[in-house]
Image (cartoon, grey):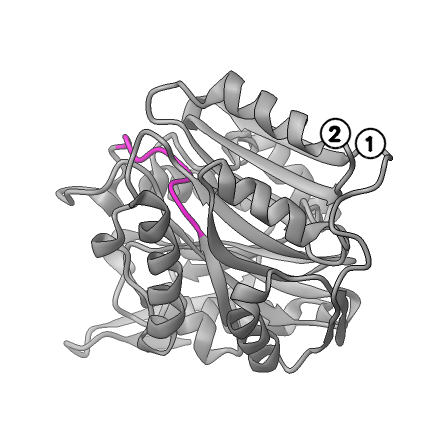
Amino acid sequence: MTVYNKRRETREVTIRLAKPEDVPDIITLIIKQHGNYYPYADLYSMDFVRRVIENRDMYIVVAELAGGLLAGMTGANSKTQFAGTLEWIMLTIRPSCRGFGMGKILISFLQQALPAEQYADIYGHCMSLDTASQGILAGLGHHITGTLLNCYRLDTHAENFAGLALPFKHNLIVTCLPGNKKDAGILYIPPVHAGYIKGVYESLGTAYTFREPERAEPGGAPSDCTVTPMEEHQYCELRTEEIGSDFEKTLDDVLKQYGAREGQSFNAFINLNDPAAPWAYRLLEDRGFSFAGIHALSGPREYMMLHYSPAIPVPFDRIMVLPGFAGEFAYIREQYERRKR
């Protein structure tokens, strides 16, 4: 395949699934793009990358130049934090090969290669430093559903970021390409955000039912919560599958353990199929969290996302989004700034 840039320069590339012998070049591309701070630390391990390619735990697509060097790659992870989903990952183009439209070609090839009908959705956590990846995904059917704010440290010397005055942490745009999940089920939502959430599901073409909870607070059973601290990034995620009577204590323990640390940030995922979701939302809001959108079609559950960064601000003026998402992004920013006042 011949690809062209705006100056009519050409590159000859072959788009294909990755092979085990590509592993050293794949890791080199990750280092060039992300330095030593790519969130998936396992992808710096040759043994790990070789194994996931061989087992198809990750579907990795590469663009190979005529001389055998890899020009770029992208992929999808089937071993995600949300059972039954695929995660779009790693759109990485070698600096000397940017501007030739390889990103769209790679992602399009990947989507055709995936057994998407076997999964609830393909989701992405897309960097907000520019809109290039967002535009490619949107053109291939992905929808933006929310944000994950102040996630991962940026103190890296990767070539892709050279010379940029970057904010302290990555801010990610959450995208969703619907798969085989056609109905989000019964959702218990904070009424104040009904308009935003309704708009997301209508854009995805997914059925849903909003229902008032029969009880205002969780029952007596313990919560099913996962707390994931990332010490190197001064970041912590709290994901709640079932909201129980001990949820308030769990939340307060997490905030007490990590909240006073310099540069600490939090993102919470609350199961919207749980009748206690509106109660949990009010509790998180009381602790300083703000609404940040939803993580839709995430396996068997639908999640509301909330953000809290007590020590560092969200650099909203530096976050770039597609024009079609400007209204939703402004809504998320308004929720954050209202909490800060």
Residue 45 is situated, as x and y percent measured from the top left of the image, at: 55, 29
As rendered, which of 104 and 14 lies closer to the eye? Answer: 104
Q: Is residue 142 above or below residue 91?
A: below
Around disc 1, counting alpha carbons within 10 Å, would you say few (fewer than 14), some (14 to 19), or many (20 or more)?
A: few
Q: Which residue is mark 2?
A: 246
Q: Which residue is mark 1?
A: 222
Near mark 2 (Cα within 10 A), the count class, few <14, some 14-19 or many ≥20, is some
| Residue type at numbered disc 1 | Pro
Which residue is found at the position 53% from the left and 78% from the top?
Answer: 141
Q: Is residue 141 left or right of residue 206?
A: left
> Which residue extends farthest right?
221
At 52% from the left edge and 73% from the top edge, which residue is drawn? Answer: 142
Indicate yes or no whether the magenta region holds residue 155: yes
Helix, strand or loop at label 2? It is loop
Q: Three-letter amino acid code at disc 2?
A: Asp
Where disc 1 sits, the SS reads loop
Residue 331 location, quadrant: bottom left
Q: From what the image shows, is residue 174 above or below residue 115?
A: above
Of the residues under marks 2 and 1, which one precedes in the sequence? 1
In the displayed structure image, the side of residue 213 where residue 325 appears, left or right: left
Quadrant showing the N terminus? bottom left
Magenta region:
148-156
Residue closer to the observer: 107 or 190:
190
Q: Main secondary structure of the magenta part?
A: loop
